[in-house]
Image (cartoon, rainbow, N blue to C red):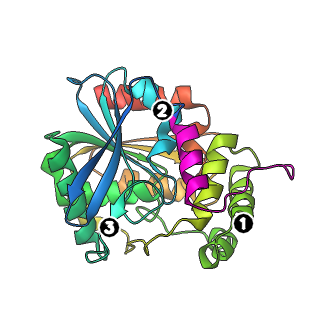
Amino acid sequence: MDSSVYEAHGPADFHAAYDRVLAQWPAGTRSGTVATVFGATHVNTCGPADGPPLVLLPGGRATAASWYANAAELARTFRVHAVDLIGDPGRSVPDPSRPLRTVADLTAWLDAVLDGLGTGPAALAGHSYGGWIALHYALHAPGRVTRLALLDPTQCFAGFRAGYLLHALPLLLRPSARRIRAFLEWETGGVPPAEWLRLQEATAGFPTARPVTGPRPSAAALRSLHTRVLLLVAANSRTHDPRQVAARAAGLLPKVETHLLPDVSHHALPYTNPSATNRRLLEFLSG
């Protein structure tokens, strides 16, 4: 990418970049806020008001707007609610007196979001870190999750590759637009979508809380989950071993449908060949 690339310096840059990506969502998309004890959660919503509810959780630092390549197709059938993770870059506003610290906090927060949206049982889809949250939530409240779609989820079925962590370490220690760009270009093979990349760069100056992390779900917990699960695995992921992810999920989840997506990296999964990804999501979620 040439030297004229957008560089972000503050909140105004972040919100401008967010709005440019959100502009690619379908006409009629609305933004709203759900109050929780952990703070105000921002949600972008589209699709028919009487459509079955579908809640989307983005990857870490990716924001709800990052579902732009999927929202229009999904919203033909579903009432889509894309959530900005609280404490992460986005438009959710955390309550500093009630930070999210544990998996139990995360599931309580998502309980409150679903209560506030008034969805009743809903389909749940998550990418990367959002997939980790979605899986833990389905284990916590299986009766509230009609179907679960996991897009190359991290720390669910396999650990991180050492090389991925080494490349990520500089931007974790001291994020900057240049470091974020270099990391994402490395992981995606040099082809991240321009507006999405600019939004990721703009998160460099965004104040964030320490993300909730924890161990992978136990084998016993995964065997107990009888919710139908779709697992889309990025074959070119540098985050973890894709075949290990697919094999462990197939061996433990009672009701899982797994697809290994060729020529797709971890971070670019929602944006690489989105028509194929959207087709698989719709077939599964509508099945």
Q: Give the class, few, some or many, for how many residues have Cα within 10 Å of label 3's Cα (few <14, many ≥20).
A: some
Q: Where is residue 269 drawn, in percent x and y?
A: 57, 43
CA distance separating discs 3 and 2: 28 Å
Image point 25% across, 75% down: which residue? Answer: 98
Q: Give the class, few, some or many, for how many residues have Cα within 10 Å of label 1's Cα (few <14, many ≥20).
A: some
Image point 37% across, 26% down: which residue? Answer: 75
Tag 2: residue type? Answer: Asn
**Eyeballing the image, is 101 above or below 35?**
below
CA distance separating discs 1 and 3: 31 Å
Q: Which residue is mark 2?
A: 70
Image point 61% across, 46% down: which residue? Answer: 268
Left or right of 221 in this view: 207: right
SS under mark 1: helix
Q: Which residue is mark 3?
A: 217
Tag 1: residue type? Answer: Arg
Image point 17% across, 39% down: which residue? Answer: 119
Q: Earlier in the sequence, mark 1 or mark 3?
A: 1
Image quarter where the C terminus lies is: top left
Q: Which one is in front, 204 or 215? A: 204
Q: Give the class, few, some or many, for how many residues have Cα within 10 Å of label 2's Cα (few <14, many ≥20).
A: some
Q: Which mark is residue 179?
A: 1
Does the residue at mark 1 contact the one at mark 3 (Cβ under 8 Å)? no
Tell us which disc is closer to us: 1 or 3.
1
**Eyeballing the image, is 80 above or below 256?**
above
CA distance separating discs 2 and 1: 27 Å
Tag 3: residue type? Answer: Pro
Residue 31 falls within the magenta-colored stretch? no
Q: Which residues are magenta?
A: 1-22
Q: Earlier in the sequence, mark 3 or mark 2?
A: 2
Tell us which disc is closer to us: 3 or 2.
2
SS under mark 3: loop
Left or right of 102 in this view: 165: right
